[in-house]
Image (spheres, grey):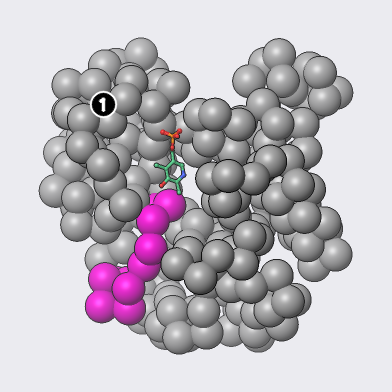
Amino acid sequence: MAKAAAKAGRTPAEVKLIAVSKVQPDARVDAVLSEGHRVFGENRVQEAQGKWPGFRERFDGIELHLIGPLQSNKARVAMELFDCIHTVDRRKIAATIARLADELGRCPELFIQVNTGEEPQKAGCLPSEVDGFVAECRMLSLPVKGLMCIPPVEEEPSLHFALLARMAARNGLDGLSMGMSADFERAIALGATHIRVGSAIFGERVSQAS
Ligand SMILES: *Cc1c(COP(=O)(O)O)cnc(C)c1O
């Protein structure tokens, strides 16, 4: 991270490292917490719900990011558990979050997920919908920090990172959630403010999470 930031003329402090702990054994998560890291990402609300309240009792200052899909029926739990949600991608979930934010009196920081590769099986709003969706979220007074993407596996991620950066800039958003174990240096070069790194920190995942 430090090398990639220096090469891009940025400081490491401009990039937040989200340690993606999905399906990792508790002992590995414990080890990373004990080293002093406090920012973590999870894919599934239910898995996070089982795992993080316990860690929060033992370690102060934990910051939790939801980086997997969010269903409306899990939105309340997600908003109580997570400090940041990276996967807002449709009007219905935005409206649900706005309603719950009113009720709870607080709202996690939000990223809008963009399906930059326009892959049919992938979540995220389409690039052509981004400007309109950002505007809708703003009308709902949602705290939108930036955009997030997961590039297609077979393509050069830099093209997608650059596209995401352009869409964020033209919407006046300064958050860019992009880059994983295999490509975080390229993401940092293109302006990532949040990188989501799992296996490079914890080792290979024992089972596969979606
Ligand atoms: C699992 C996951 C990551 C981390 O992937 P690694 O390749 O293990 O770094 C990042 N972002 C999302 C959305 C993920 O689901």
Determine whether 34 is above or below 177 in the image: above
Residue at 78% across, 17% down: 6
Task: Compare residues 62 and 203 and report the one nearer the observer.
Answer: 203
* The quadrant where residue 127 appears: bottom right
Task: Compare residues 1 and 207 and report the one nearer the observer.
Answer: 207
Determine whether 114 is above or below 93 in the image: above
Residue at 80% across, 67% down: 171
Residue at 68% across, 41% down: 156
Please, what secondary structure does the residue beneath circle 1 have? helix
- Residue 112 x/y as whole percent: 58, 65
Work out which quarter of the rendered image holds the N terminus and state it: top right
Q: Quadrant of ligand 1?
A: top left
- Residue 198 x/y as whole percent: 40, 31
Relative placement, left or right, of 120 versus 188 is left
* Magenta range: 66-76
Residue 58 in view here = no
Magenta-colored stretch includes residue 118: no
Residue at 15% across, 38% down: 54
Residue 198 in view here = yes
Task: Compare residues 156 and 129 and report the one nearer the observer.
Answer: 156
Determine whether 24 is above or below 146 in the image: above
- Residue 159 x/y as whole percent: 76, 47
* The quadrant where residue 30 appears: top left
Magenta-colored stretch includes residue 74: yes
Residue marked by disc 1: 29
Relative placement, left or right, of 106 versus 148 is left
Crowd class of label 1 (few under 14; some 14 to 19; many from 20; radius 10 Å) = many
- Amino acid tagged 1: Val
Q: Is mark 1 within 8 Å of ligand 1?
A: no
